Amino acid sequence: MILCALLSAVPLLVAACGPAGEPRPAGEPRPAVALGAATVANLQQGRLASSPRIVFLGDSLTAGLGLPREQAVPSLIQERLDAEGFAYEVVNAGVSGDTSAGGLSRLDWSLDGDVAILVVELGANDGLRGLPVSQMKRNLSEIITRAQQRGIAVIFTGMEAPPNYGIAYTSEFRRVFRDLADQHEVAFVPFFLEGVAGIPSLNNSDGMHPNAAGAQIIASTIWRALEPVLETQDR
């Protein structure tokens, strides 16, 4: 099975003076002076600082292991938000190697500030380590509950476990995500790696982490779940 195969392994400013501060003759157009990259970045940061946040809480798949930060899924979602005219700041709270317990332990500071939406992508490392499914379920449920208690909308993503722990474990593992999505009535993406898992051309050499092309596909999948939530938030 393809899924299991993968998991196993400002505008321009205008100058008021001419060179050396000399007054410019009346009627002569003023030259445009482009802002430096650092200045633009600071202005963008100022805008984003006043915007509600979308936090991606996850592991290496969210962090973008093996990719430049700007190619990770959260960054791609930020690009899409900007292009579509949604004023949100996306926060990449992905930590490589994190389990559901790790995500829960850093939830409070991850949700610091004006967080409107939380995207939860956790569980892959629980599955890879064969950790108890019941433990993962408690952790994920607590993450969703605490976010909802703060009035934060949740988008929950599912994951697959590797096959080497047996059919019973993989089935129970998969079912946890659907059960929690139904229980907490949250937007649900059944499999974070849908359309990417097990396809060599869409993954890094480790066969487990998406490359730039794979990240683009995942970002499109997440956007389909995110956009209706954004429209609800903006009403």
Image (cartoon, rainbow, N blue to C red):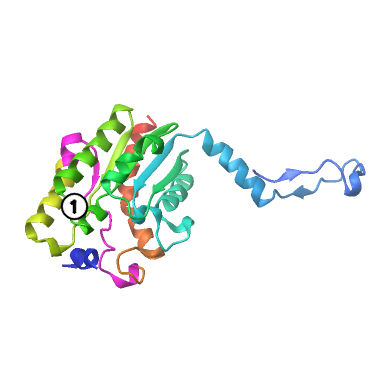
Q: Residues within 10 Å of mark 1 (few under 14, many from 20)?
A: some
- The residue identified by callout 1 is 131
Give the vertical position of 158 relative to 183 (above or below). below
Give the amino acid type for the residue marked by disc 1 in the picture. Leu
Apparent side of residue 123 relative to residue 172 in the rendered image (left or right): right
Numbered marks: total: 1
Q: Residue at x 63, y 46 (%)?
A: 40
- Measuring from the top left, give residue 7's x and y in whole percent: 23, 63
- Find numbered disc 1 in the image and state the secondary structure of the residue it sits on: loop
In-front residue for pair 221/166: 166
- Measuring from the top left, give residue 64's x and y in whole percent: 40, 57
User: Picture quarter containing residue 117?
Assistant: top left
Apparent side of residue 132 relative to residue 203 in the rendered image (left or right): left
Give the vertical position of 75 relative to 67 (above or below). above
Q: Residue at x 44, y 49 (%)?
A: 80
In-front residue for pair 139/190: 139
As for residue 198 lying within the magenta part, the answer is yes
User: Picture quarter containing residue 130?
Assistant: bottom left
Which of the image's four quarters has the C terminus?
top left
Give the vertical position of 165 relative to 113 (above or below). below
User: Picture quarter containing residue 210?
Assistant: bottom left
Q: Residue at x 20, y 35 (%)?
A: 185
In-front residue for pair 16/97: 97
Apparent side of residue 172 relative to residue 99 in the rendered image (left or right): left
Extreme residue in the left direction: 168
Apparent side of residue 158 relative to residue 167 in the rendered image (left or right): right
Which of the image's four quarters has the N terminus?
bottom left
Q: Residue at x 42, y 33 (%)?
A: 112
As for residue 165 lying within the magenta part, the answer is no
Residue range (magenta): 180-203
- Measuring from the top left, give residue 99's x and y in whole percent: 28, 49
